Amino acid sequence: MSSLTDRYLAATLRTVPAARRAEIETELRGSIEDMIDGRRADGRDADTAEREVLTELGNPAQLAARYADRRLQLIGPAYYLAWERLMKLLLSFVPATVGIIVGLLEATDGKNPGGAVGEGVATALQVAVQIAFWVTLVFAVLERTNTSLNLPAWSVDELPEVQANRQITLVDVTAAIGWLVLVIAYLPIQHFHSFVPSGDDGNLPILDPALWSFWLPFLIAVLVATVGVEIAKYRAGRWTWPLVAVNAVLDLAFAVPVVWLMSTDRLLNPDFVDRFTWLGREENLNTIATIVVAGTVLVVVWDIVDSAIKAYRNRH
């Protein structure tokens, strides 16, 4: 049977350059024997000394990588920060943008409006995976070819201002933007597939199709602008009075038309109302209108007051 030292040397030499194997074997075997002799001189038996020495030398694959000057990481510290910044930048908007575009195209072509949301989400995930794979592959190649990125040297001027007690977290902003994106996507999707069949087996939009002449595009524009406020809020790290003012304007720009349209029976599609007997009754429709109006007003008032209170606390 081969000794532990022979097995260790064989495992180490397996992945080192063939031209250096004899040299490395002689050097490594001599070092192991010297270390074993040193431990035996301290009173250990030969088997125990050999096991301790080989354990101290560590995994033979790692030792072979050091002899071969071969990296054992996919992306090392010289390239990692640049890889991380690029990944965060691309993943922050590219998958979502592509997913929304694909979802809207799927909804508008009339072939599969019901699966538009699923198609958009699946596409966004695929884009995210592709970005992660190809960016990582490029940086791994750069790592192994020692290609210089020629990045500007770091300067103390890049140090950010200290922001104690940051109020706006990435989780909060991501959740808010995700909800806004869903609402933005649903407004056109419900026009093509609302999951409410009409009498002729067609689609029955929940919102009045006449609103596409102005109000629905206007509301979508307001929601897109609100996404921009969420991003600006995260960059600032806290509520500021300019952000409060812009947020209040956008809240009112969305709430006032919704309240007015609902109060004047112009928000819901008349055919949708007639489709359900209970909804066609005036008292029930008034109840729905009251709930929508009250809920919209309460949400807007709470959002404006909450943002103002947080900005007031940050005034110093």
Image (cartoon, rainbow, N blue to C red):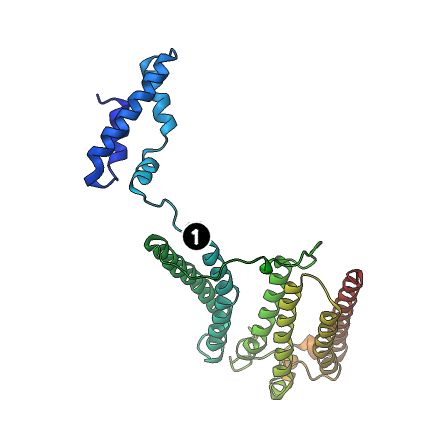
For the residue pair 256 and 287, the one nearer the viewer reads as 256
Q: Answer above or below: position of 154 versus 223.
A: above
For the residue pair 199 and 310, the one nearer the viewer reads as 310
Which secondary structure, mark 1?
helix
Q: Residue 221 location, x and y as percent?
A: 62, 79
Find residue 27 and report its image quarter.
top left
Q: Residue 212 location, x and y as percent?
A: 60, 85
Q: Answer above or below: position of 45 versus 267.
A: above
Q: Residue 73 location, x and y as percent?
A: 39, 47
For the residue pair 155 and 203, the one nearer the viewer reads as 155
Left or right: 210, with 297 as reference point: left
Q: Answer above or below: position of 190 versus 88.
A: below
Left or right: 68, with 82 as reference point: left
Residue underneath mark 1: 78
Left or right: 13, with 42 as reference point: left
For the residue pair 81 and 217, the one nearer the viewer reads as 81
Q: Within 10 angstroms of label 1, few (less than 14), some, or many (20 or more) residues?
A: few
The amino acid type found where label 1 is placed reads Ala
Find residue 278 and report its image quarter.
bottom right
| Residue 50, visible in the rendered structure | no
Q: Residue 181 location, x and y as percent?
A: 58, 70
Query: Residue at point 36% right, 29% down?
Result: 57
Left or right: 90, with 177 as reference point: left
Q: Quadrant of the N terminus?
A: top left
